[in-house]
Amino acid sequence: MNNRIVVITGANSGIGKAAAKQFAKEGHTVIMACRNIEVSRKTQEEIVTSTNNTQVDLMKLDVSSFESMYQFADEFMSKYEKLDILIHNAAYFNHGAKHTLSTDGIELTFATNVVGPYLLTNLLLDHLKKSDDARILHAGSNIIKHFFDPKREIDFDNLTGEYKSSEKFTVYKMYCQSKMALVMLTFKMAEEYESEGIKVNALQINGAKMSKETLQKVTLGYRMVASIQNLFFRQPSYMANNYYELCTSDRFKDKTGKLFNDKLDVMTPALAESQGFLEEIKQVTGTNKYPAYAQKKVVREKVWELCKELTESNSNNHNIL
Ligand SMILES: NC(=O)c1ccc[n+]([C@@H]2O[C@H](COP(=O)([O-])OP(=O)(O)OC[C@H]3O[C@@H](n4cnc5c(N)ncnc54)[C@H](OP(=O)(O)O)[C@@H]3O)[C@@H](O)[C@H]2O)c1
């Protein structure tokens, strides 16, 4: 199993970098899919030197841009004959930033964290099918716990174009919604690709120390909060090891459509009806339950259809798909 071909998005820092290092150390072929080649080149060289593995490739990818994903997929498929492991690790969470649209007119958090993984997976599907044990992993977040509040929902009216809601826009809220949508996408993709033998799971990340560079991307207020959180968070290598286990261990070979916690236990949905105050506290502070909202089939289908619609309307401009 030590010769898998692995694509990791956002592999130049944090958990993605630590994961790239671990896969390389174990002898796998690693493709670091990063948007800033200049910055990422240093990380690539560092990984090659420290692991003695020269099979660490660096390829340009901006997961918020359709054009970039098409170019990446095209280049990847001409260079490699299959894909065994695809880790959607990159995410946008510049807390405090103002409402921004991607080059394709999609709110940037949703474009990067949801539509990106959807389209990239689709573009690489034929190569995943060629693997004897293809595994896809989504980087989820503890932030979806906000959905234990039954009033929370994904605001589908404000995912594209100008922001129209009377509520103030915050990246924090969008990040929360995008990570919930990503869990729903995980469940739907697992169903869709089951017959192809492709497994799709998500890991609910409950904290990993953030780098200085990452902290610089958020506003001062969030930076202060994150700096305090950093005192309690584990090193990125802990979660990177979870990526590694989920994508390579025989223990998870047949698992698909699951959300795992930081201890790699399968999480289960909370009941939709309130179970009383104590039970609710247990859910919010615990790591075994995810909000019942994630089980809503209608919303899940809506997320899937929206991703399909947004990416299909652009596919005519490109030469693959
Ligand atoms: N750290 C935590 O406490 C925590 C908690 C919950 C969930 N997570 C999740 O864990 C994953 C890794 O986060 P991290 O903590 O390791 O943060 P990080 O160090 O900031 O890593 C994020 C990576 O994503 C890349 N990225 C962002 N937008 C991109 C785009 N459009 N195209 C390509 N790459 C892009 C960044 O590249 P640049 O360097 O070019 O910006 C960076 O390499 C994320 O999915 C995050 O949501 C983390």
Image: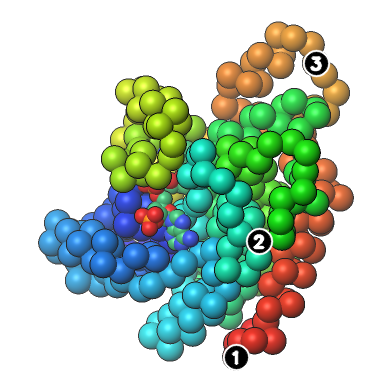
For marks 1 and 2, the one nearer the N-term is 2
Q: CA distance from mark 1 to mark 2?
A: 22 Å
Q: For residue 201, say whether it is visible.
A: no
Residue highlighted by disc 1: 319
Q: Which residue is mark 2?
A: 106
- Decide: few, some or many residues near mark 3? Use Cα within 10 Å; few <14, some 14-19, many ≥20: few
Circle 3 sits in a helix, a strand or a loop, which is it?
loop
Above or below residue 163? Residue 73 is: below
Residue at (77, 70) in percent of width and height: 309
Query: Residue 138: x percent and y percent?
Result: 54, 52
Of badges 1 and 2, nearer the viewer stands 2
Q: Could you say whether the residue bearing mark 1 is in a helix, strand or loop?
A: loop
The structure residue drawn at horizontal position 39% and vertical position 35%, both measured from the top left corner, is 208
Whether residue 169 is situated above or below residue 102 in the rendered picture: above
Horizontally, residue 213 falls left or right of residue 75, namely: left
Which residue occupies the foreground of this view, 60 or 85? Answer: 60
**Residue behind mark 3:** 275
**In the image as oriented, which residue stretches furthest toward the top?**
278
What amino acid type is highlighted by mark number 1?
Asn
Question: Which residue is at the front of the view, 213 or 129?
Answer: 213
Looking at the rendering, which quadrant does residue 119 occupy?
A: bottom right
